[in-house]
Image (cartoon, rainbow, N blue to C red):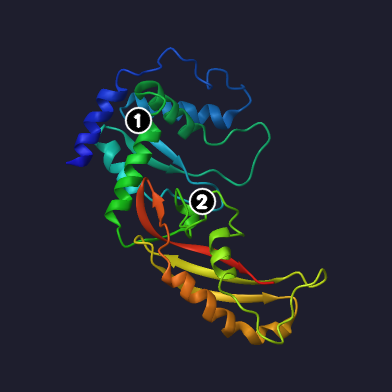
Amino acid sequence: MRQIFFAGFCILAFGSCTNSDKKSKFDNISSTDTTCIKAVKRAKEDISKGELSFCYHTGSLLYEPVRCEEEIDSILTLLGIGYRNVMTSDVVYEGQTQGCYGDYMNEVILRRFGNHFIDSIMYKADSIFVSKNPNKVFNYHDCDTDPVFPGDSSDDNRNFNPGLQIAFDSKVTYPEGYIRKTPNDKLGFVNLNLLIDKQGNAEIQQFSFVFDNDKNLQFQKHFKNIYEPIIKGTKWIPATIKKQNVSSTITAFVYLK
């Protein structure tokens, strides 16, 4: 029902926002660019047969389809538009342009439905995907905002977590025998792989200590007993995708003196 409503919304919102008079970037293809000429010709033939498709470029050697392709396809089907994943070769030939089939198809869609049509479809489809997968754990790279410790922000350097660092520094003690960093021994930190669920609860999945001075490795348990209660006992701000809280992984760092 939600998808049907959205389809109707798209028709009303974008049906009159055409750009039919806008010049196409394919109007002046070089006569020697036979790869592009043939691809555009094929696209025009398909469109003339009523086979207009939104084309998502999935890369070349690394195939990376969009996660919500099923939802995109469902929405576009309601509008009479197809969906295709298109790939390009990692081998580039001078003077030959790849991806023209998909680019031409997408240009036609934008002319017919408006410049924001594809972005709106992608946004809605991703929102539906997230709501259909409430237990999925996302990588923080794939989220709109990162999960953060109170006092941090998504804009902070991912190699430094000021809120978490302040909380740790307020509790930490350095045991007898610990050798502090010097200009020559600059490394001393804990690398933490965390899972932050959509309620803001944190779980430490992996951790590793890095010291220039290996003698400090004997104190791992001491420092773990300090940072672990801080991380697990604090309500984190969860990651979001399309304004929905999601569970995600994140890498965090705690630095030692």
Name the residue tied to disc 1: 52
Pointer 2 or 1: first along the chain = 1
Toward the viewer: 3 or 168?
Answer: 168
The amino acid type found where label 2 is placed reads Ser
Comparing 175 with 95, the one in front is: 175
Instruction: Name the one closer to the observer, 240 or 188.
Output: 188
Q: Quadrant of residue 224?
A: bottom right
The residue where tag 2 is placed is: 154
Q: Quadrant of the N terminus?
A: top left
- Percent of width and height locating residue 52: 35, 30
Within 10 Å of disc 1 (Cα), the crowding (few <14, some 14-19, many 20+) is: many
Q: Position of residue 124 (x, y in %)?
A: 32, 40
Q: Is residue 161 above or below residue 72?
A: below
22 to the left or right of 197? right
Residue 194 x %, y %:
48, 68
Q: Residue at x 28, y 52 (%)?
A: 131
